[in-house]
Image: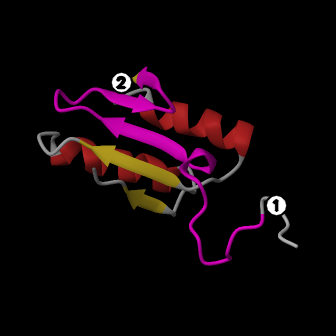
């Protein structure tokens, strides 16, 4: 008899909802878990999420036209907040 449940193979990556979602639009606009943040607010925004939810992984999705400088700033903000597990999401 087949059992239904939430058991997933151990090698399957965790769902992205368990990660902090960071999106960079072509215009350079940054969204963290759906909320628009400025570059200067980025460090504080990630710090608040870490304080609330713990050190999760980060799923970073950036438009190909987004500035490399913004991507580097996001990586630095993640590292500064102890978020070492950053994956790049491609579409």
Badge 1: few (under 14), some or many (20 or more) residues near its Cα, within 10 Å?
A: few
C-alpha gap between disc 2 and disc 1: 44 Å
Taking 56 as reference, is 48 above or below it? above
Magenta segment includes 9: yes
Residue found 17% across the figure and 27% down from its top: 27
Stretch in magenta: 7-36
Q: Which residue is mark 2?
A: 38
User: Which residue is more in the foreground, 88 or 41?
Assistant: 88
Q: Which residue is mark 1?
A: 4
Mark 2 or 1 closer to N-term?
A: 1
Mark number, residue 72:
none
In the image, taking residue 42 as reference, residue 27 lies left or right, namely left
**Tag nearer the camera, 2 or 1:** 1
Taking 9 as reference, is 17 above or below it? above
Residue found 54% across the figure and 44% down from its top: 20
Give the image quarter of residue 74: top left
Residue 89 x, y percent position in the rendering? 35, 54
Residue extending farthest to the left is 65
């Amino acid at each position: 008899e087949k059992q239904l449940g939430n058991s997933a193979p151990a090698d399957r990556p965790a769902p992205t909802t368990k990660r902090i979602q960071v999106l960079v639009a072509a215009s350079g606009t940054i969204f963290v878990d759906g909320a628009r943040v400025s570059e200067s607010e980025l460090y504080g925004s990630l710090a608040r999420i870490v304080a609330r939810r713990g050190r999760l992984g980060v799923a970073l999705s950036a438009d190909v036209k987004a500035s490399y400088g913004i991507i580097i700033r996001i990586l630095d903000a993640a590292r500064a907040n102890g978020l070492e597990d950053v994956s790049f999401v491609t579409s």
